[in-house]
Image (cartoon, helix red, strand yellow):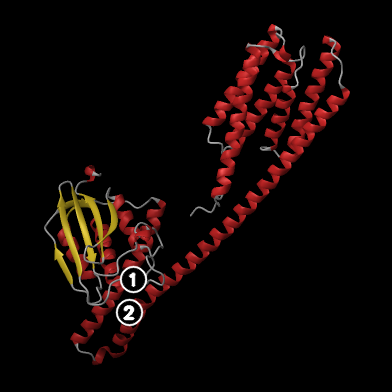
Amino acid sequence: MQTRARPTVGEDAADILARRSIAAARGVVGAVIVAYSLTVGFGGDQAPMYARAIGTVAGAGFLISAIADLLSDGNDGAVRRTLIIGDVILVVILLFALVGDPDSYVYIVVAWVAVEAGTAFNVRTTLMVAAFLAAATLIEETIAVNVFDHMYDTAGSLVRISTLAAVALVTSSYSTAMQSKRLLHEERGRATVLQELDETKTMFIRAVAHDLKSPLAVVTGMAELISGRAGSMSPEQVQQLSGTILKNGRKLESLVGDLMDSERLSQGVLRLERTDTDLADLVRAAIDDVDLRGHPVETDLPSIMASVDAPKVERVIENLLANAAKHTPAGTAVWVYLRDEGRNVTVVVEDAGEGVPDAVKDEIFQPFVQGRENSPGTGIGLSLVRGIAELHGGRAWVEDRATGGCAFKVVLPKAASEVR
């Protein structure tokens, strides 16, 4: 069972909104930069050709980054961080495209990239990114003053650097807090899942112990009786007691077989040994072997040949019969049918019990799941029914009967090559 806690719907929506907002911002920034580069130029004046070319490349880079973000699933942290590092490089390129004609809007882009970094990195890394961007703006302004004779705006530079550091710190602190909240939520989720696993294990052990206890007590008691009084018993009494021992021994064998096959199914190592089998004979053998607890059985069993693993299919039918006997009132009938459907054959086991609620019609075929609370059994019988059916290339499900109760149906292909 998966033990990783899933985020809540609200957290999923917030994450998706944040990622899509960042991707949209990349696209807007890229479109604006390309438009400025190709039309009016920076600062309202026609920019030098090199600046317009560099600006166009930077804008196109933001657009490509936005498309890459939208196409990714957004869950890979390494991809997100790579895109943000790419945005940092692009904004530095943009800064030096404007060195000859600085424009205030580029500092807005610088601040946005710092905010973006805060959503993906921890506080320390985000401040390092902000420091890198601040150093780039100072170098750009120094070049603008010394090479292009612009006035140096000390106060403006301090304001811009302080603002950059502030937005980076606030954003990364908030992002770190949200990440801590997410980790706490996941840790609580893992604890809940582990607790559920422990409860399931305890319930399973109790169920197995209960199912083993009764036939073991019968086998032990009958064996002790024969051992202690064999000389005074008639052959008929010995034969009757031996039959009881054999019947309960088969119960134990069936339970152990279910447990082993369930494990093999979960590991994907259960293999089929197909033989041409008359399914009608197989169903009759299963009816003879199962303790139906006084339930009369009505059958409609035409002879149908199929290439199946006979012992495993017999186990399927036995589990369905035992399930019907276990969950229906004493004395009510159980119906067993075979239906020839061309390339497939359908096995139907119906009962007149309370039926299966719609909410659990699929769940009851999962391992260790039972349709009702305090229900007897280990909860692996129906999981084996579906698992063995699917291993043959068929399927298993349950439906409501029109007159009450339920109908379990198993479809099996007649030939191994005719799996549907």
Residue under numbered circle 2: 219
State the residue lying farthest toward the front.
44
Image coords of residue 306 (percent x, y): 18, 51
Name which quarter of the figure residue 249 lies in: bottom left
Q: Position of residue 110 (x, y in %)?
A: 73, 26
Q: Give the x, y percent position of residue 215.
A: 34, 77
Q: Secondary structure at mark 1?
A: helix
Extreme bottom residue here?
A: 232
**Residue positioned 55% across, 44% down in the render:** 13
Please state which amino acid type lies under the numbered disc 2: Val
Foreground pick, 266 / 337: 337
Residue in the image at 15% along x and 61% along y: 281
The answer to which image quadrant residue 12 occupies is top right
Q: Quadrant of residue 283?
A: bottom left
- Does residue 415 show up? yes
Nearer to the camera, 387 or 289: 387
Q: Quadrant of the C terminus?
A: top left
Q: Which residue is painted at 30% across and 69% down in the image?
A: 354
- Which residue appears at 31% of the width and 82% of the height? 223
Residue 364 in view in this figure: no
x and y percentages locating residue 204 in the rendered image: 44, 67
In the rendered image, the vertical position of residue 217 relative to residue 180, given as above or below: below
Q: Amino acid at mark 1?
A: Leu
- The answer to which of marks 2 and 1 sits earlier in the sequence is 2
419 relative to 207 in the view: left or right: left
- Give the Cα distance between marks 2 and 1: 10 Å
Residue position for label 1: 252
Q: Residues within 10 Å of mark 2 (few under 14, many from 20)?
A: many
CB under 8 Å between discs 2 and 1: yes
